Structures are given as C-alpha cells and as structure tokens.
Amino acid sequence: MSVKRVNFGLDRFSGLYLWAAFIILFSILKPGLFPMMATVHSIAAQQAVSAILGMALVVPLAAGTYDLSVGATANLAAVIVIWLQSSQHWGVAASIVTALLAAAFVGVVNGFLVTRLRINSFIATLGMASIVSASQTIVSDNNQPVPPVSSTWSALTQQNFGGFQVVVIYVVVIGLFMWWALEHTPAGRYVYAVGSNPEAARLSGVRVNKYGSLSGPSLTFGQTLLLPAFAAAFLGSTQLKPGRFNIWGTVLAVYVLATGVQGLSFVTSAQWLSDMFNGVALIGAVWFAVSRQAGAASHPIWRMFRRRPAPPPGTPEPAGLDGEPSEVAGSPGT
C-alpha cells in the first residue's frame, strides 16, 4: 500500500514559512518590542517604497533585460515633483504629471538604446543612471529640496487608513494593476514570452524589440533602494510562481526581508545590518533561482546568468536579447 506524501508547498511558499519563522523567533527574543502593531505599521510603511520599486523591476526582468537606472530615475522624479511645488509654486497635479513624464522619457531613451542602438541593457541603464543622477543635481542645484507644505500633498502622502500609512494602499493598488497587466493582457504575456525565449517569440510574431525595451515605472525614490529591490525581485521569482518574475512574489519577498532586518536590528542595533542582509539575500536569491532552473536552458533567469560556451574559431558570437554580441564568456545575457 503506497503512502501519499504530504506536499507542504515548500517549492512555492517557502517565503511564507520563512516569514512565519522570523515572526516567531523575534517575538520570543524581543517579546516587548517586536510583536506589536506599531512594528507592523512601521515595516509596512517603510518598505512600501521598496515594494513599488521591486515591482517596477519585475517588468524588465520578466522581459529578460536589466534596468539599473530605475532607482536614479525614481529619485529624479521625486526631486522634480518636490522642486516644482516648493521652488516654482506649481500645483500638485501638474508637478506629479511632469515628474512621471520625465521618468517615462528616461524609459523611452533606455528602450531606444537597448533595442535600436543594440547596447547591452546592463551597460545602457548603468550609464543612464549616472546621467540621470547628474540631471537631478542640475535640477536641485545640489541642494535638498524643501518639502511642500500643501495640504493636498500631505493628504496624498501622510494620511492613515486603519493605522497604515496611505503609501501602503498605493502598494496594493499598483500591485493589482501590474499583476493584471502582466498576467491577464496580451502585452504582459508577450513580455514573459520574450524573456523566456526571444527567438521563439520572434518566430511567433511578437515584436521582440518593442517588449524588450519596456522598463519598469519609476514611481518611488532612492538609489539606495536599488539593491533591496533587486534582491526582492529575484527572491520573489522563487515564490508563488517559481522560476518566473512575478508581482506578488516580489511584494512577499520585500516584507520577508524587511521583517528579518527589523528583527535583527532590535536584537543587535548594528547600523550595517540592512546592507549586509540585503546583499546576502540578493546573492542567495540569484543562486537559488539559477540552481532550480539550471535544467531549463531557455528560462529567463538561467539565461541571464549561465555561462556561454566559447564559439569555434572564426565563428561570430551570437547576439543576445539586446542584439549585442557578448564579448566575454559568462557575462549576463539580456
């Protein structure tokens, strides 16, 4: 008589188990500090920005490309929206629209560099991040913009709902929209198709250059959040839908990592803890994602990090997704 094995869903829900383990562990270690609603509200609000930036990264990563400029672009948008209100006395709506248009323009330029000029997306967006940072300095004159005092702006950023800051609501709304766009629209399915196998997608009629140029929306600020966002995106690709960059897996990863960092900070109070934790998490998440997909050579995560065999002498190097030949064996595919 065969015994039916119980499936605990570790292949898809390991993040939830890890999250629960963090909560139990730090509640035992710091019973008067960690298991409090104030801690829940704090983590939810503080990590909302990272969650939005992580969701922004899901789009280019799903298409098989990098976007290292997303943090700088988000920071530029934040500086523009504040500078226009404080220094130029613009209205809130006009300032927000202008900032979003500036961020969208950076995305369009990135797409042009990658798909038309065929520059490797890693190089193109790394260079664009530096250009955007310089543009931010020009706009702000290297001075910290004065925060707006408009009641409308405060309502958009400081309101609370059920004890949670309004930015947490933005995470849910943006997450729902991006989940719908990626999972339930033709454009979203094309993005995944291009990231999984660009040649097959091209042969089936998908305009690979069009979808390969997509760059996640820069709706938040903070170049320092780029590493946590990448860590969350890659860790999220091992959750819920293993081997696939997905919105809710990324959001889950953000809050799992944040819970670990917050708990450890209560225990040790070390200033370097967040950077160390996120760096280790990024390396571990990439290794875990690649090791699980090593047998699927066409998978986007495996394609990004696998080593390419050296071609025979005299054979031209095949072009990657960006259209640029890879000059160094083992360099990331895009």
Image: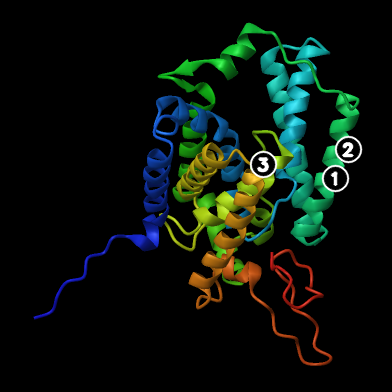
Write the residue at 67% across / 54% down.
210
Q: Amino acid at mark 1?
A: Ser
Mark 3 lies on residue: 225
Closest to the observer, 186 or 312: 312
Report whether 160 appears left or right of 209.
Answer: left
Left or right of 112: which side holds 231?
left
Where is residue 306 drawn, in percent x and y?
64, 74
Q: Can you say which quadrant of the picture contains the C terminus?
A: bottom right
The location of residue 277, given as percent across then percent down, is 60, 50
The local secondary structure at tag 3 comes to helix
> Are circles 1 and 2 on residues that touch, CB within 8 Å?
yes
Q: CA distance from mark 1 to mark 3?
A: 16 Å
Image quadrant where residue 77 sits: top right
Please tell me which of labels 1 and 3 falls first in the chain. Answer: 1
Q: CB of mark 1 within 8 Å of CB of mark 3?
A: no
Q: Secondary structure at mark 2?
A: helix
Look at 76% across and 58% down and name the residue there. 122
Identity, as a three-letter code, of the amino acid under mark 3: Leu
- The disc label shown at residue 134, or none: 2
How many marks can you see?
3
Vertical placement of 129 versus 87: above or below? below
The one of 119 and 155 positioned closer to us in this rendering: 155
Query: Which secondary structure, mark 1?
Result: helix
Residues packed near mark 1 inside 10 Å, few (<14), some (14 to 19) or many (20 plus): some
Distance between the alpha carbons at the discs numbered 3 and 2: 18 Å
> Which residue bears the numbered disc 1?
130
Tell me how far mark 1 sits from mark 2, CA to CA. Answer: 6 Å
The x, y position of residue 118, in whole percent, is 80, 62
